[in-house]
Image (cartoon, rainbow, N blue to C red):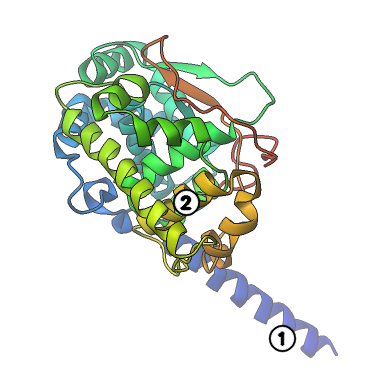
Amino acid sequence: MTGVVIFLIGIGIIAAIVSSAKKRKKLLKENIPGNLGVIEHVPLQPLLEKLDKSLDVEYIHQVKRRFLKDHPNRSEDEFEWLLFELKRYFVMANILKKAPMFSEDVDEIWHEMILFTKEYQGFSEKFLGKMLHHIPNTSPEPAPQERAFFDWVFSQMFEITQFSWKTWGSFFKHPMAGTVLKDFRNHTEDELIEKYFQANEDNRELLEYLAGRMKQQLVVSEKIYQANPKGSFSKQRTYGDMTALSLMMVFFSYYYFGQYWDYAKVYAFAEITKYTSGCSNASFCGSSSSDDSGDNGGGGDSSCSSCSSCGGGCSS
């Protein structure tokens, strides 16, 4: 009997070691996508070059040392993955008038950066030309339409990795506001850029690309609806380029806002849920602001709920 117990304990230990090794493998910094995981043909290179030049190498080393000291349970590889997502967030903050922070884990790196006040101010001014403020979220109410717009923009520019899905919480969970979609359908690109984005010499081409993409998806959605009012889309089987899901998101947001998730979940969670922790969404921890004016147009009602805290159980 004792021998059987020892054998079972040994099997358990081996299984734990194998499981731990698999988790560590996923977070190897060598596996981080190059070029911030930008989708091919997206005109993002000028902004990426500006971001790279704005982040001083020694500054990031200081942030890394402090983060690992303050979080002894975190690994160097995990820091690099979180920094990877934070850089993508900084791109979002550069182009959006309002960029909520939806990840508690990514927010931790941002907080560490801010503690080096002089260096952080220098980075902000180089990358945005003004201070990139961190505004904590003090409201318990979720912001589903803000998250929806964030998801759509993010998915047009970046591949969504397994780590992205886990760290930010599930993408495409909420419908986009009807007012936003109607604006993109009826207004000119210049009007849309003025209302929803922050234009500068480094991102103008990108903003024109994004405005054009939304207009294109709305036209395609109308054609799909005419052919089949319930729509028909391919199920997402792998991580990576998820622009096909963004089209699905636009279609069901525009034609079935009130029943959005009843339809969208068939496609959005097809195979992806096998690899995630199960958190469906997260309310934001803070937002960036370099301009007090403007609104991202995230109006509209939604019955979708949100996790009660940032990360919502999706921490690494």
Horizontal side, residue 119 vs residue 251: left or right: left
Residue at the (35%, 32%) spot, across then down: 186
Q: Crowding at label 1, few (<14), some or many (≥20) Cα neighbours within 10 Å?
A: few
Q: Number of labelled discs?
A: 2
Q: Which mark is residue 289?
A: none
Kindly indicate the quadrant of the structure image that contains residue 236.
bottom left
Q: Label 1 amino acid? A: Phe
Q: Indicate whether 176 appears above or below 51.
A: below
Q: Label 2 amino acid? A: Phe
Residue at the (31%, 12%) spot, across then down: 121
Q: Which quarter of the image is occupied by the N terminus?
A: bottom right
Horizontal side, residue 140 vs residue 199: left or right: right
Kindly indicate the quadrant of the structure image that contains residue 244.
bottom left
Q: Can residue 24 be seen at all in this image of the molecule?
A: yes
Question: Which mark is nearer the camera, 2 or 1?
Answer: 2
Along the line of sight, the residue nearer the viewer: 277 or 196: 196
Horizontal side, residue 144 vs residue 76: left or right: right
> Residue 311: percent from the left, percent from the top?
59, 40
> Residue 81: percent from the left, percent from the top?
38, 47
Kindly indicate the quadrant of the structure image that contains residue 64.
top left
Q: Name the secondary structure under disc 2.
A: helix
Q: Crowding at label 2, few (<14), some or many (≥20) Cα neighbours within 10 Å?
A: many
Q: Can residue 160 be seen at all in this image of the molecule?
A: no
> Residue 221: percent from the left, percent from the top?
41, 53
Along the line of sight, the residue nearer the viewer: 30 or 271: 271
Q: Which mark is residue 7?
A: 1
Circles 2, 1 touching at the beta carbon (< 8 Å): no
Q: Which mark is residue 251?
A: 2
Q: Indicate whether 33 appears above or below 105.
A: below
Along the line of sight, the residue nearer the viewer: 265 or 40: 265
